[in-house]
Image: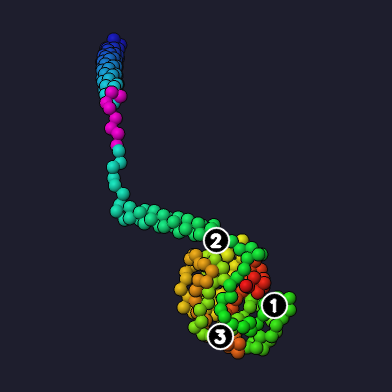
Amino acid sequence: MNQRQKPKKKRGATVAVVLCFVAAIAIAGTYTFRDYREAQQEEELAQAEKTKAMTEDNSEETSTKPKNIVINTKEKPEEEEKEEKKEAEGSEADDAEDLQSTSSAGAAAYFDSESKLLWPVNGAIVLNYSMDKTVYFSTLDQYKYNPAVIISGAEGDQVICGAPGIVKSIDVTAETGTTVNIDLGNGYELFYGQLKEVPVNVGDWVEAKTVLGYVSQPTKYYSVEGSNVYFEMRKDGQPINPVDFLE
């Protein structure tokens, strides 16, 4: 019976030894891992301190280092300078022209109900002004209102301006041909139609007796009436009878 129990005691001792060995390894591993973590933490702390010190040094260097001020000394492109110069010259020319027109207009371009007009051409009245009743137009073979005075004239005769003013427009229409519009001031305007070889330009200042052009061949609207000058007058955009102002 004692011989059977000996193997059990031997196995128990072996197990105890194994357990002690395992425990020793675990304890050693624990201390080794803890030492490793402590060493790693110390290294990370040292690196952080080093980084902080470098950052502070850079910050001080940046704050004390003078800032570079960049001044744009790039010149304007040559084409841009030419364009600006051209615009400036054009503006000066416009101002000079406006000043000249204003001075001339301020001096003489005034017309009122007491002012008088010169006849545009030497000739007889073919069709009278008529806005209250219709008159007969031979070429059209019909009766219609007439906002102008139709004055006969030989082709090539001079057509003169009736009063001082500014050339407001020069238009070509099927009915009145080349037509010059003169602004007399104070809302008064004159229209000279059926012209050719007009020597004036829009914006020109013209005096009384200034040649505005020459009598042209009549348009198809006045072929029966023959060569003539279409002479219309307006006040504030409405037709009025120019005969009332003719000398």
Three-letter amino acid code at disc 1? Ser
Q: CA distance from mark 1 to mark 2?
A: 30 Å
Q: How many C-alpha atoms fall within 10 Å of the one at disc 3: few (<14), some, or many (≥20)?
A: many
> Where on the picture, by quarter, is residue 146?
bottom right
Q: Are marks 3 and 2 in contact (CB under 8 Å)?
A: no
Q: Under tag 3, what secondary structure?
A: loop
Residue 223: image location, x then y, percent = 58, 88
Q: Nearer the viewer, residue 84 or 36?
A: 84
Q: Under tag 2, what secondary structure?
A: helix
Whether 192 is drawn above or below 96: the answer is below
Residue 240: image location, x then y, percent = 67, 71
Q: Residue at x 50, y 67 (%)?
A: 206
> Where on the picture, by quarter, is residue 87?
bottom left
Give the residues in magenta: 63-70
Q: Nearer the viewer, mark 3 or mark 2?
A: 2
Please tell me the numbered disc located at residue 227: 3
Three-letter amino acid code at disc 3? Ser
Q: How many C-alpha atoms fall within 10 Å of the one at disc 1: few (<14), some, or many (≥20)?
A: some
The residue labelled by disc 2 is: 108
Quadrant of image for the N terminus: top left
200 relative position to 190: left or right: left
Whether 62 is drawn above or below 187: the answer is above
On whether residue 66 falls in the magenta region, the answer is yes
Please tell me the numbered disc located at residue 130: 1
Q: CA distance from mark 3 to mark 2?
A: 32 Å
Three-letter amino acid code at disc 2? Ala
Q: Residue at x 29, y 47 (%)?
A: 75
